Image (cartoon, rainbow, N blue to C red):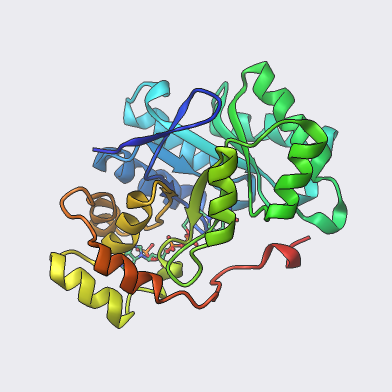
Amino acid sequence: MVTSIPLRDGRSIPTIGFGVYKVDDAEAATAVGLALDAGYRHVDTAEMYGNERGVGQAIRASGLERDDVFVTTKVWNDHQGRDGTLRAFDASLQRLGLDAVDLYLIHWPAAANDRYVETWQTLVELRQSGRARSVGVSNFQVLHLERIIDETGEVPAVNQVERHPWLPQRDLKAFHEQHDIVTAAWSPLGRGRLIEDPVLVGIAAAHDVSVAQVLVRWNVQQGVVVLPKSVTPSRIRSNLDVDGFVLTEGELAAIAALESGQRTGSHPDTVA
Ligand SMILES: NC(=O)c1ccc[n+]([C@@H]2O[C@H](COP(=O)([O-])OP(=O)(O)OC[C@H]3O[C@@H](n4cnc5c(N)ncnc54)[C@H](OP(=O)(O)O)[C@@H]3O)[C@@H](O)[C@H]2O)c1
């Protein structure tokens, strides 16, 4: 069963979401269909992924009620600013075939362009219109969060950032907790690179689960939304199946010792 985490705007977000980065429209239609069938109720896409059509198609084909599936999409860097964001949002809704998204995010601060405050104000407008039910950001660092909060008085519901044992984002997560912002973890499996880590392999063996399940569970246990991606049917199913074990304090300490600061994706300062 997928649990949910409350959002500061009174809504809630399913703790485990299905990631679809680097999956094309046709593959997304199949993979999201399998994921919804397996029990996922949250899909994480973006205009940049080029698969919103496939995601929408799978949701319609699933036969699930619209309100039973939480859909996140994101405005891409080139479309930041009020007009670009409003156009990008309309285009995303059209490709998804939806009247509203559950969560709309600014994909990256792209701080060099200095349009993220205006973009954030536009997302707040979209939330007020009801077409974006909740709004948040992605890849924002503390200084970006402080600036949008100071200049608009509006706090994002979610900040979606790279997070896994190499990069647990301790300072950012503490800031989120102080401001009632939900942390969401992208690349929770380190894009597959954490799967062979010997410490994680040992912990997985002790619970008779996979390393991916340990990584998903690690986020769930810390109240963090987690977005594993897979196009492999057996992995899609098992990555969601993390209720049958609990990581011990000793295991959490062993995982904490893996922190190295290593990223598997871009640093926010380098993305324009
Ligand atoms: N906001 C952002 O800037 C941002 C950036 C990156 C990602 N994201 C979101 O986060 C999601 C997840 O991140 P990600 O796609 O970068 O990487 P990820 O979920 O950390 O890793 C995906 C990789 O792990 C493999 N994998 C999945 N389950 C596995 C298992 N049980 N055992 C072994 N290998 C497994 C997948 O292979 P197969 O697919 O072949 O099974 C794929 O190669 C994305 O899809 C996207 O929705 C957001």
Point out residue 102 in the picture as x, y percentages from the top left corner.
52, 29
Would you say residue 179 is visible in this rendering? yes
| In this picture, residue 117 sits left or right of residue 234 | right
Quadrant the C terminus occupies: bottom right
Count of numbered badges drawn on the protein: 0
Write down which quadrant ligand 1 falls in: bottom left
**Above or below for 172 versus 225:** below
Quadrant the N terminus occupies: top left
Q: Nearer the viewer, residue 154 or 46?
A: 154
Residue at figure coordinates x 42%, y 44% from the top left: 29
Q: Residue furthest top?
A: 129
Point out residue 27 in the picture as x, y percentages from the top left corner.
43, 52
| In this picture, residue 148 sits left or right of residue 266 | right
Q: Quadrant of residue 73?
A: top right
Residue at figure coordinates x 37%, y 58% from the top left: 230
Residue at figure coordinates x 34%, y 58% from the top left: 218
Point out residue 267 in the picture as x, y percentages from the top left corner.
66, 67
Q: Residue furthest bottom?
A: 198
| In this picture, residue 13 sits left or right of residue 215 | right
Point out residue 135 in the picture as x, y percentages from the top left corner.
62, 33
| In this picture, residue 49 sits left or right of residue 185 | right
**Above or below for 92 versus 250:** above
Would you say residue 84 is visible in this rendering? no
**Above or below for 208 versus 42:** below
Q: Nearer the viewer, residue 100 or 266?
A: 266
